[in-house]
Image (cartoon, grey):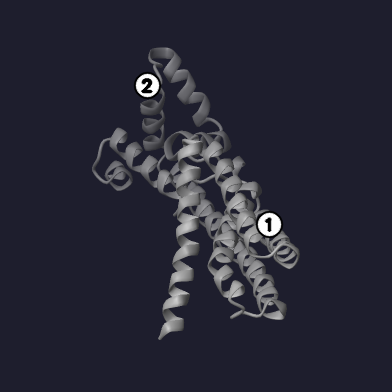
Amino acid sequence: MKKHTHFAGKPALEHLVEARKKGSAFTQEAHASELSGFLEAGVRATQETVALFLIFLPLLHEKLLPFYPGFFAFTLAYSLWRGSFSALRGFGKLERLHRLIQEEHWEITHHRDQEREELEELYRAKGFSGEILTHIVTTLMSDDHRLLEVMLTEEIGIQTGRYEHPLKGAVSAFCTSLLCSLLFTLTWSFGGFFPSLTLCLGAMGLANLYLAYKERIAKTASTCWLLSLGVCLHIGSYLLLLFFQEL
């Protein structure tokens, strides 16, 4: 009866596959595979901030949006929002991580026989068998703390030590967004339209190169595509501005 409750009438191996899918869903972000760390939060904030600048550039160029204090106040408010949003998302992920840990701890406490069966399947898949397999499983089952760590890593596929405190990502996102705003402000004040556009596209390209390197995808192709999207975003904003001006 216990096995049916824990495995839902399925073999241990199939239960492990479903557990790994659950862990995979946790470690995926909406945009791409998760890159944990405050640097990644700052790079994401850079991309989003620059995209906003590309949208607002036509308004600034046509003097339809006052640079001082309107645009500067907006960029400061956006930086605060970006940092707060990063913190909110980080604490939400941390809460989901704690829930997974609690669920696995409950399973270890209440379904030890089934957890042992899962361990045997995991290490049998790694090539262990016979007395060595029995020794490994018995050793891990004797230490609940170690068993929990192994099950989180091997069964669900998450490593708790790689997740940083959400406030680090929030501070990184805020500071990066604010720094982009200040650089854009200085460039617009002393250089005007074309240097500001060049700064935006350059920052977007560098941010994407970093993400492409971390995600191990084609750097040149992904950067060219992103820059093309940035240019289209800017041109589309300008065309929409002209359209509404003609109305």
Q: Residue at x 66, y 67 (%)?
A: 79
Judge depth for marks 2 and 1 and give the one in front: 1
Q: Which amino acid, by three-letter code, is at mark 2? A: Arg
Secondary structure beneath label 2: helix
Q: Image check: 13 left or right of 103?
A: left
Q: Quadrant of the C terminus?
A: bottom left
Q: Image check: 194 left or right of 29?
A: right
Q: CA distance from mark 2 to mark 1?
A: 47 Å
Question: Which numbered disc flags the more N-terminal residue, 2 or 1?
Answer: 2
- Residue 241 higher or lower than 121, as above or below: below
Q: Quadrant of the N terminus?
A: top left
- Residue 162 higher or lower than 81, as above or below: above
- Residue 215 higher or lower than 90, as above or below: above
Q: Residue at x 39, y 16 (%)?
A: 127
**Crowd class of label 1 (few under 14; some 14 to 19; many from 20; radius 10 Å):** many
Q: Which residue is mark 2?
A: 124
135 or 247: which is nearer to us?
247
Residue 176 numbered tag: 1
126 or 62: which is nearer to us?
62
Quadrant in the rendering for residue 120: top left
Q: Position of residue 108 (x, y in %)?
A: 46, 42
Q: Which amino acid, by three-letter code, is at mark 1? A: Thr
Quadrant in the rendering for residue 195: bottom right
